[in-house]
Amino acid sequence: MCKKVITLSICVLLSFSVIISAIPSSAYSTQATSNGNPAKVSFWFAFFRSEPNLSFGNIQAIYLNGREVTVLGYEGGYAFVQDNKTKNKGYIHKFLLNDKTLDITKEYDYVYVDMEKEGSIKVNYAGEGKLVWELSKSGIADITQYDDRSFSVTGLSPGTVKLTVKCNGNKDSCIINCINKWEEPETSTAKNNFSLLHTPDSSNVNLSLSKGTAIKACGNIPNKKDYLYVYIGSVQKYGFISISDFPGIDYVLTQYHHYDNGYGVRFSSASNKIKDYASVLNDVTMENFNLKVAGFVEKYTSVADECKILRSGSVTSGNISAACKQTAGHLDGTCLTTANLRNDLTKQFGAGSGNISQIAWTGHIMTSNLDDRSNSTLGVGSIIITPCGVVNSSNFSNLSNSEVRKGSLYTLVHETGHQLNLYDYYCYKDMPSQGALCSNVNCADCNGVPHASGCIMLKRVKVEEVDIDSIYCDECDAEIRKYLAENLD
């Protein structure tokens, strides 16, 4: 029987809605004020210090989670604050606050925003003179300027964004990296000496640490595949390490799961269900390949949703199985096809890549339920998951909860196999459009392609009822390892 590995330890990062990385001491000074920006302690506790360093001798008080302060400025990785209750002034490590403000004081300051919720940050320009509107908006959903000295950035997407402001002819910049915070942090112990980094840059060393140090990997930045975002409990610091310094993780694949209104209507607790499926997938890939599959789930409005909304005003249990009855040309006339769902998905969220998969979960029945089933396209890094296989083919009602779970796990693990460069080896003749012929050139039955009978790329495997290491056959195992080494290393 497959035993699901559950990570019991929860990274302290989970209490943060927005987090800011340790910054080199040269990056901030107490003269770079944030004009009294309100903030709260967002960790279990925080030391209130007289000086911006880790000395036990400068601890003035211990503040509990939720203690309200006003940020007056920054020095090193610390915020210079005034306690709203006592009015005393001192320093609290910036990691321990939910402060969402970045003060640009020099070129290439860094800020790290986690993506548990929509990334957003307020930016204050602390230079001389009047701020001139000149910002690099690549990858940013919205920028709102408040006044001549400040603006907000919302809807940050994963990756790295450079903001450039111009003031009296001088340009200052900051770098915003969006961290994907993992639902399931991974823990390990360093086998060699290693460096904790301020930023995902091997030259920006924060601390040198020794082998045997406990490490908790909490997240990653998709376009920085060689680094992990970690917490080191022995020194109470967050930062980055090279992925090679974390035993047990050799690669990271980021999957963004987008479920539409139809899926939410068809399946209760949709988000939690998908998170659970993603967790099982991660167990499979970690066990077999040391591949961390970091899954992130959000609801969206799909082109299939729009079809039903335009006709009925909303998506309901009464129309998620209905065919499109709009006039010709409506939404290209093909709204209930996986091809159109994929085009819509990549339009809204961008294409995937070698280490990023965009996944759409729809609860709508496609125009051809059996032909147009779940599928994966490696070229644009996307997976479309339809109800085919978890509903009755006659009336499209859901199968039992246990069968829905089995079918969903199989589909996610199988389609992720395609994202890792695997082929189908099963016969396509059960699809009505195939007739008596099978178009799958890799079919083990029709075209004599040898393949192990228990492989998930050949048959519908019950993922939680078999040994994890038998889910992929030897041929598929070798192909995945080759793909990881060439694309995610």
Image (cartoon, helix red, strand yellow):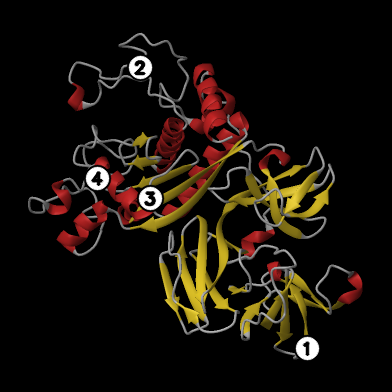
Q: Identify the amino acid type marked 3.
A: Gly
Residue positioned 49% across, 77% down in the render:
151
Disc number for residue 340 = 4
Q: Identify the amino acid type marked 1.
A: Asn
Q: Which residue is mark 2?
A: 442
Looking at marks 3 and 1 on the same chain, the residue that comes earlier in the sequence is marked by 1
Disc 2 to disc 4, C-alpha distance: 26 Å
- Crowding at mark 2 (Cα within 10 Å: few <14, some 14-19, many 20+): some
- Crowding at mark 1 (Cα within 10 Å: few <14, some 14-19, many 20+): few
Q: Nearer the viewer, residue 475 or 486?
A: 486
Disc number for residue 18 = none
Residue 137: which quarter of the image? bottom left
Residue positioned 47% across, 85% down in the render:
147
Mark 1 and 2 residues: CB-CB less than 8 Å, in contact?
no
Mark 3 and 2 residues: CB-CB less than 8 Å, in contact?
no
Q: Is residue 374 left or right of residue 105?
A: left
Disc 3 to disc 4, C-alpha distance: 14 Å
The percent position of residue 129, horizontal first and vertical second, equals 55, 84
* Element type where label 2 sits in the image: loop
Q: Identify the amino acid type marked 2.
A: Asn
Q: In the figure, 100 relative to 471: above or below?
A: below
Q: Nearer the viewer, residue 263 or 290?
A: 290
Disc 3 to disc 1, C-alpha distance: 48 Å
* Element type where label 3 sits in the image: loop
Looking at marks 3 and 4 on the same chain, the residue that comes earlier in the sequence is marked by 4
* Element type where label 1 sits in the image: loop
Q: In the figure, 284 relative to 78: above or below?
A: above
- Crowding at mark 4 (Cα within 10 Å: few <14, some 14-19, many 20+): some
Disc 1 to disc 2, C-alpha distance: 72 Å
Disc 3 to disc 2, C-alpha distance: 30 Å
Q: Which residue is mark 3?
A: 350
Residue positioned 46% across, 31% down in the render:
417
